[in-house]
Image: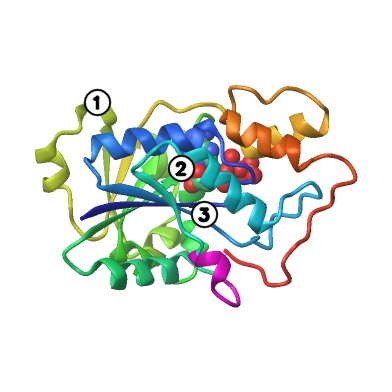
Amino acid sequence: MHIGVMGGTFDPIHLGHLRAAEEIYWAFELDKIIFVPAARPPHKEDEFEASAQHRYEMVSLATVYTPYFSVSPIELSRPGRSYSVETLREFRKLYGDESTIYFIMGVDAFLDIAAWKEARELLSLAQVIVTARPGWRLDEVERSMTPEQRHLLGDPRFKYMRVSEITRESVTAHREPGLVLSVEVVSLDISSSEIRQLVKEGRSIRYLVTDTVAAYISKNRLYQPGQKAHRPTEAST
Ligand code: ATP
Ligand code: MG
């Protein structure tokens, strides 16, 4: 099996996440992509944030019509802090060594990865795919890392690919541990923080999120003034 794993806060999930996942799914001929909402990381201190349960529900609603997208509660149900490396270890156990796991992340998230728990180990558990995001130069990812960051990651090699150029042969040829694939997908200039801000100001978020997610936000009055969400006591990364 070829499985994509996409982690994030998804507060809320938006079309930027979904389009990046869709393109990677087809280009790499994956069997499925699992979205993994994280518990609240300590650096996210936005007052208008949604609880883990709401974020999980929204990912479910956003992916309900796509048979090859699913959502895992693995990081929400695990007690204590949750780390991507532990999630990948669990998926590795679940799917076995014969499966290929691709860990999909935007370039902004990848530039922080050296600070994540057991980053080097993470790169050996899954093949990392870094996707484009407006505001960041994907072709400069390698150059923007400091020697120390590269060392922490075990001096990975980088391969830049355009989604349109990916073939079955190139996917197989580049399936090797420690190789980071930078993939130029159509990147939509959408962020969850911008969506939270729009809702707070009472403005439209239509065509930035799926209709199901927009309806859920409105029904549950998320991100609106006076709706301070429950925040779990345990933090995560
Ligand atoms: P926030 O503004 O709250 O940080 P976000 O839009 O960055 O939210 P996250 O949940 O932080 O969303 O991101 C989850 C993952 O999706 C990260 O790897 C991030 O780089 C990626 N991502 C987020 N937005 C986009 C986008 N518009 N296009 C491609 N990838 C994205
Ligand atoms: Mg983000």
> Seen in the image, is 82 located left or right of residue 107?
right
Extreme residue in the right direction: 226
Q: Earlier in the sequence, mark 1 or mark 2?
A: 2
Percent from the top left, x then y, of residue 189?
55, 27
Depicted 121 relative to depicted 108: above or below? below
Q: Which amino acid does label 2 sit on?
A: Val
Disc 2 CB within 8 Å of nearest ligand 1 atom = yes
Kind of residue sitting beneath label 3: Asp
Residue wearing tag 3: 112
Q: What sort of colour scheme is used for the picture?
A: rainbow
**Residue under pointer 1:** 164
On screen, residue 50 above or below 61: below
Q: Mark 2 points at which residue?
A: 107
Q: Does the magenta stretch include residue 11?
A: no
In this view, the mark in front (3 or 1): 1
Image quadrant where residue 186 sits: top left
Which quadrant is home to the N terminus?
A: bottom left
Measured as percent of width and height from the top left, residue 228 is found at: 84, 52
Range drawn in magenta: 74-81
Q: Where is residue 122 in the image (x, y as percent from the top left)?
A: 37, 65
Pick the front one: 192 or 174: 192
For mark 2, does the 10 Å Cα neighbourhood hold few (<14), some (14 to 19), or many (20 or more) residues? many
Q: In which quarter of the image is ligand 1?
A: top right
At horizontal 67% and vertical 33% (from top left) the residue drawn is 215
Q: At 37% from the left edge and 71% from the top edge, which residue is drawn?
A: 90
Q: In this view, does 216 lie to the left or right of 201?
A: left
Looking at the image, is mark 3 or mark 1 earlier in the sequence? 3
Q: Which of marks 3 and 2 is nearer the N terminus?
A: 2
171 left or right, relative to 227: left
Mark 3–mark 1 contact, CB under 8 Å? Answer: no
Q: How crowded is mark 3: few (under 14 residues within 10 Å), some or many (20 or more)?
A: few
